[in-house]
Image (cartoon, grey):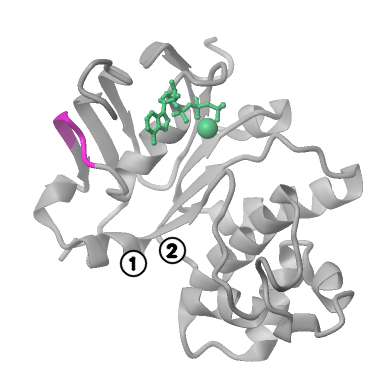
């Protein structure tokens, strides 16, 4: 299993391709000190989400290595790795199940009160209550439909409930109103405090808060520095 210490993450000479013909990521080298926040920015299709997907071994690197506290993530169980990482994807998948179960599975055995608290912090509680069956509403083709931004807030609620050591957020591009935005940002700041955090950032406010910024272009890092340096 993964022995978690400080949460230092190092990408070393990472290459990755989805298909044999074309390399999606080339020569990716960077390190994130434990507890700090790194923002990934770059145009659409540059490879930002792909970098995040390598971290929890949704895909494995084609070449090179990713280490957490010195351990190659291919040398630990996927289970122990994913236990430590909370992922908020760009377009989260929800199970065809109640909203309650969709959130509670992040920490089995948590109370309904804990779920409500997480949903309030993620600014999705009121929306859920507005459905006819509230938290028992089933999501999916025969149930309630949620927008991309709403699904992402459900995923944030999951992460808040899970309280993982490492946080990965693929920030939604879809606009929410500024009051909701503020609530989410506050919840997020609280969640990320003291934890190693990866954020694909679109908003300047998110970028400003990061300790380090990686600029990705066509699968390569073209800049790596603090906000002041870049
Ligand atoms: P965006 O800002 O639009 O989210 P991104 O920087 O996150 O873009 P990625 O999703 O990492 O970009 O995609 C990088 C490249 O890999 C793109 O050319 C994309 O078409 C390709 N790609 C992404 N997912 C797959 C996949 N499952 N199979 C094949 N190619 C893929
Ligand atoms: Mg993406």
Dot 1: element: helix
Any mark on residue 28, and which? Answer: none
Q: Identify the image quadrant of residue 207.
A: top right
Any mark on residue 164, and which? Answer: 2
Q: Residue at x 25, y 57 (%)?
A: 5
Does the rendering let one see residue 44?
yes
Q: Identify the image quadrant of residue 142.
A: bottom right
Residue 138, how many percent across, how many down? 68, 78
Direction from residue 26 to residue 175 in the image, left or right: right
Look at the picture and state if 87 lies above or below 95: above
Direction from residue 60 to residue 171 in the image, left or right: right
CB at disc 2 and ligand 2 closer than 8 Å: no
Q: Which residues are magenta?
A: 60-65
* Residue 62 lies in the magenta stretch: yes
The reply to whether callout 2 and callout 1 are in contact (CB within 8 Å) is: yes
Dot 2: element: loop
Residue identified by numbered label 1? 83
Residue 186, how many percent across, how many down? 73, 53
- Quarter occupied by the N terminus: bottom left
User: How dense is the environment of label 2, judged by Cα within 10 Å: few (below 14), some, or many (20 and up)?
Assistant: many
User: How dense is the environment of label 1, judged by Cα within 10 Å: few (below 14), some, or many (20 and up)?
Assistant: some
Residue 28, how many percent across, how many down? 28, 21
Q: Residue at x 57, y 43 (%)?
A: 90
Pointer 2 or 1: first along the chain? 1
Residue 216, how many percent across, how many down? 45, 16
């Amino acid at each position: 299993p993964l022995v978690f210490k400080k949460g230092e993450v190092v990408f070393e000479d990472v290459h990755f391709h989805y298909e044999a013909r074309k390399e999606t990521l080339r020569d990716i080298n960077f390190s994130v000190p434990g507890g700090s926040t790194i923002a990934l920015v770059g145009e659409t299709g540059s490879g930002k989400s792909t970098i995040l997907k390598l971290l929890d071994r949704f895909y494995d690197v084609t070449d090179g290595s990713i280490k957490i506290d010195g351990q190659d993530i291919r040398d630990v169980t996927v289970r122990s790795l994913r236990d430590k990482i909370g992922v908020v994807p760009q377009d989260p998948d929800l199970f065809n199940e109640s909203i309650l179960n969709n959130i509670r599975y992040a920490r089995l055995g948590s109370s309904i009160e804990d779920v409500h608290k997480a949903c309030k912090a993620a600014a999705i509680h009121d929306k859920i209550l507005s459905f006819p069956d509230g938290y028992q509403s089933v999501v999916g083709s025969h149930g309630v439909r949620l927008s991309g931004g709403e699904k992402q807030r459900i995923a944030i609620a999951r992460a808040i409930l899970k309280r993982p050591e490492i946080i990965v957020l693929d920030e939604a591009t879809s606009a929410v109103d500024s009051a909701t935005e503020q609530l989410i940002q506050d919840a997020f700041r609280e969640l990320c405090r003291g934890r190693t955090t990866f954020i694909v950032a679109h908003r300047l406010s998110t970028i400003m808060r990061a300790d380090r910024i990686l600029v990705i272009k066509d699968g390569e890092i073209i800049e790596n520095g603090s906000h002041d340096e870049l």
